[in-house]
Amino acid sequence: MAKLKISGARKAYGATMALSRGDLELQAGEVHVLIGSNGSGKSTLCKIVAGSVKPDSGDVVLDGKAVTVEGPRAAKALGIGIFYQELSLAARRTVEENICLPDLSMNGPFVDRTALSERAGRYIALFEGVAGEGFAADARVDALRADQRQLVEIMKALATEAPVLIFDEPTSALDRAQVDRFFEILRRLKTEGRAMVFISHRMDEIFAIGDRVTVLRDGRTVGSSRIADTSPQEVVRMMVGEEPSLAAAAPQASVANEAKRPLALSVSALAGPGFTDVAFDVRQGEILGLGGLHGQGQSAVLRALFGAAPVTAGSVTLDGAAYRPANPRAAIRAGLAYVSGDRGRDGVIHGRTILENVTPIHFLRNGLKLASPSALRAKATPAVDALKTKFAGFSHPIGSLSGGNQQKIVIARWLIDRPGVLLLDDPTKGIDLSAKADLFALVRKLAAEGMAIVLYSSEDAELLANSDRILVFNGGRIRRSLQGAERTRFNLYEAAYEAA
Amino acid sequence: MSRLLDLARQPLLVALALIVVLLIVGELLSPGFASPTQIMRLLIVAALLGIVAAGQNLVILGGREGIDLSVGGVVSLSAIIAGNLMNGQDAGIPLAILGCIATGALFGLANGLGVTLLRIPPLVMTLGMLGVLQGLLVVIRQGIPSGRAAPGLSQFVTQPFLFGLPGIIWLWVAIGLLLAFLLSRTVYGYRVYAIGSNEQAARMAGVPVAAMRVSLFVLSGVFAAIAGICLLGYSGSSFANVGEQYMLPSIIAVVFGGTSLAGGKGGYTGTMAGAMMLTVLQGILTTVNIDESGRQMIFGATLLLLMLFYGRGRAMRA
């Protein structure tokens, strides 16, 4: 009998289907790997088990009994512990307090500090020797490094002593020795008969620790197999599914033609927080795709190029001249444009008019002092129309538009005065399909007219369909460059899931 | 009914309606309250407050909890400097104006740099600056006699100049037109709203956010300094902490005029109406013999009520 069985779990957020049919069968004494590309529904499935997301439908059977996990507390009572991908630590508290936070040792109404220290100490001891400098029971969490914080989160999950443990990307920040120690612990827990779900994007880890693998694709469980009976290639194939002939859809500039075009942007040995040794060239008229899993440095590189994130090493050449990205203002003046996928944070000037949202770049590029609304409207109209933006008038507030149209306005601000290089940082996040289509039609047109474009998209299909060339990022480095017929989903995933 | 409610949410209309109502109430309580000479006097007093509130308005529009609590101190200091530099002589007026504006700009610059470079919250920074100014005023009082206003200045503030209105009213109107133009027809104005509404987005769109914010505090200091000079002209000579009374009303006028304390929304026209409304209210309170402490309580309560009234709109936006 399975320790935990989930069947037909379904969860939609508005019109977005996060999980359409999630199935998982977890046995006692196994490490069960859950794998799938960006947005395939892994995290949603985990959250349903942990009670932090309520499914629209589906059954959860624990020890042969149907249960409903009403919330995190209910999950704890049922014996389910979880390691969250988004770290859930109390930053200003100590390591030991965080470890025991889900279940504080009480002495009447007071926290029993002695018992708490003793209990936390047992879990801290598990990682003795690999936790690194500064890691102590009484160290404050905000003083720790990223890998050390991740260890605290692991200890916190272990301290629940739950029969079912879920680890959602627990190893992403850990070094080799820490991962090895963690795997030793998992192996021991297996012998105790615990059931564990393990999510990782590193194929080598999956095959080192997993007993069984379940693959999700587009919100559905598409297969499950014993690790011993499969191979990394087989797993990638399951993740990819039937591969449509995507490469054919892309407007592939001929390679010979490409080489003749002048270089627009050249990056060498660039390093900063979240990326190292990044080097690439983009020619005029080329769409260079940045691929891979979320947060492997793609966005950090784009922000750094735009002067919005620090660069610690390396050099950049823009249109043949040395360029140092000091701040966004300097970047814009140098002819760079940057569109963020987080429009609420980086793009939209809330509560103001559409005109005010579409004009700031025009002001800067032309050194304007006066703002004449009628002249600005005339300037902005072609840019806004090029994106087929639907709006009632420039004097209406930006908030009156749909998300997709807001993003179009934010993009249009870059098009009044054409930049030389357009950096797109997951620009279609959270916008509707027709807006996406309008955006990419324009992006291709701009490239055809000679603009150099660097595109990061968390949607692999979008990336494959629109890039002339794709650089696959993994662990902050470029792992592979895919050109021409190599630009397949299979190759993209294989490089993205390679050992970092 | 909902149309009426919408109307009630138009701060400018509310302020103008309240001014009329208050004038009528004042006339009923004390006949002669709304006489032309009396209204003229109220307008002059409103202009003084309105000029201080102009700078306050800009700082608040710039967002990130922008507020300038040091305006009262700058007004007082400016009145003393002006009095000493002109000392009753018209010839001293140009130097007095220059000296006061430079002083106001300097304190504004210090506030702006503290807020941007040192990342001190505006509330704390300008409150600290107010403390510094108050201390400075005490020191100055002990060594320097309070100067006197030049006749030309007093005339500018109190005597009819054009169409029966004194120069200060025209100055206020000019400031109103200037700010309306600045905020709606210049790149600077667009950027004020941009940083007030979404500082991160403004930075990503190439707006020099820190320089903008510093300039807003400088302008606030300059406007407070101008008000200080005019105040000297109004009262003839400066006295201790003459400007203290402006801190709270300058904020209330801005909020009453429909500018959001969260920044990025509002304008100066409403603030002008707010300044007039407050001045009339103050006149009524004086007429019915409510003393300074009572007035302060009423003003404080007014601000809190305003926050309650306009707070819903902001909560919905956030």
Image: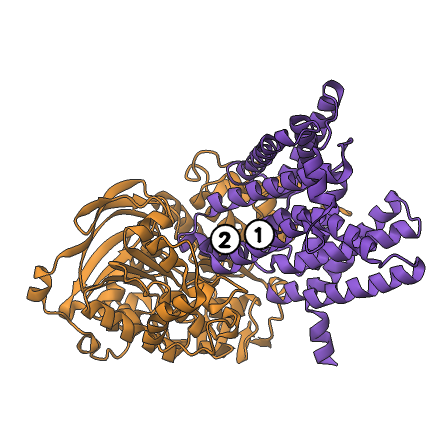
Distance, label 1 to label 2, CA atoms, is 8 Å
Which residue position holds label 2? B199
Give the camera-side residue of A403 and A469: A403
| Location of residue B234 with respect to A33 vertically, above or below | above
Amino acid type assigned to the residue bearing label 1 in the image: Gly
Point 78% across, 31% down: residue: B239
Note whether residue B56 is visible: yes
Q: Could you tell me the amino acid type at mark 2?
A: Glu
Q: Position of residue A62 (x, y in %)?
A: 55, 72
Local packing at callout 1 (Cα closer than 10 Å; few below 14, some 14-19, many 20+) is many
**Residue A448, position as x, y percentages in the image:** 19, 70
Determine the chain carrying the residue at label 2. B
Classify B208 as above or below B148: below
State the purple chain: B
Which of the pair A95/B256 is nearer the observer? B256
Residue at image point 64% right, 63% down: B314
Give the x, y percent position of residue B51: 66, 47
Q: Residue at x 38, y 57 (%)?
A: A363
Label 1 with label 2: CB-CB less than 8 Å? yes
Give the camera-side residue of B111 and B73: B73
- Disc with the residue nearer the chain's start (1 vs 2): 1
Residue A214 shows up from this direction: no
Q: Quadrant of residue B90?
A: top right
Residue A193: x %, y % from top left: 49, 60
Q: Is residue A28 left or right of residue A472?
A: right
Residue at numbered disc 1: B63
